[in-house]
Image (spheres, rainbow, N blue to C red):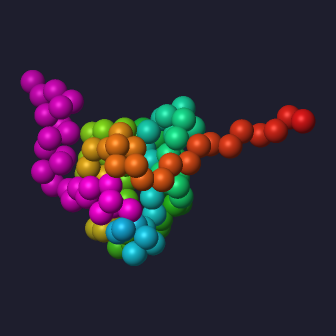
Amino acid sequence: MKTAHDLVLAARAGITELTPSQAQAWQVSCAALLIDVREPDEFAAGHVPGAVNVPRGMLEFRIADLQPDGNAPVLVYCKTSGRAALSCQSLASLGYTQLRSVAGGFDQWLAEGLPVEQATLPSFE
């Protein structure tokens, strides 16, 4: 029987992963849609500037609204890169061709000291 780790390793074998610095440069150079597939509470605690939060379980249902062009560049990340690898594999099966994943995910992004945004909460004053 396979484990979740086995599925992630298989997904990684079929996708392109970029270091956080490479991912940042690629995203800017081609104006890629940046998708954070973590859960909303993870996203609210901090995320890559410009990212759209689409939890892993909702990705296939929302991607066509976010990016209807299957040839447009899409950059995906999660906490450590497992969910992002599975997400890229799923997007590829839907016909998306310009996919990249952030190796090491948001944890590695933070470790490299790259920019991070916090969610802004509404003011009740």
Residue 94: % across, % down: 32, 58
Q: Quadrant of the N terminus?
A: top left
In the image, 22 versus 69, the foreground residue is 22
Residue 64: x and y, percent? 47, 60
Where is the C terminus found, in terms of image quarters? Answer: top right
- The single residue placed furthest to the front in the displayed view is 113
Dividing the picture into quadrants, the one containing residue 15 is bottom left
Q: Main secondary structure of the magenta part?
A: helix
What residue range appears in magenta? 1-24
Residue lying at 57% horizontally and 38% vertically, measured from the top left: 44
Q: Report if residue 13 is visible in the image.
A: yes
Residue projecting furthest to the left: 1
- In the image as oriented, which residue stretches furthest toward the top? 1
- Residue 9 covered by magenta stretch: yes
Tell me residue 9's x, y (percent): 14, 41
Instruction: Identify whether 23 is placed above or below 86.
Output: below
Left or right: 95 in relation to 11: right
Q: Is residue 26 above or below residue 51?
A: below
Q: Is residue 93 visible?
A: no
Residue drawn at 26 percent across, 49 percent down: 103
Residue sitting at x 53%, y 58%: 50
Rendered residue at 68%/43% (across/down): 120
Residue 108 belongs to the span the image colors magenta: no
Nearest the eye: 66 or 76: 76
Which of the 4 image quadrants contains residue 37? top left
Task: Residue 89: give x, y in percent of width and height.
Answer: 25, 51
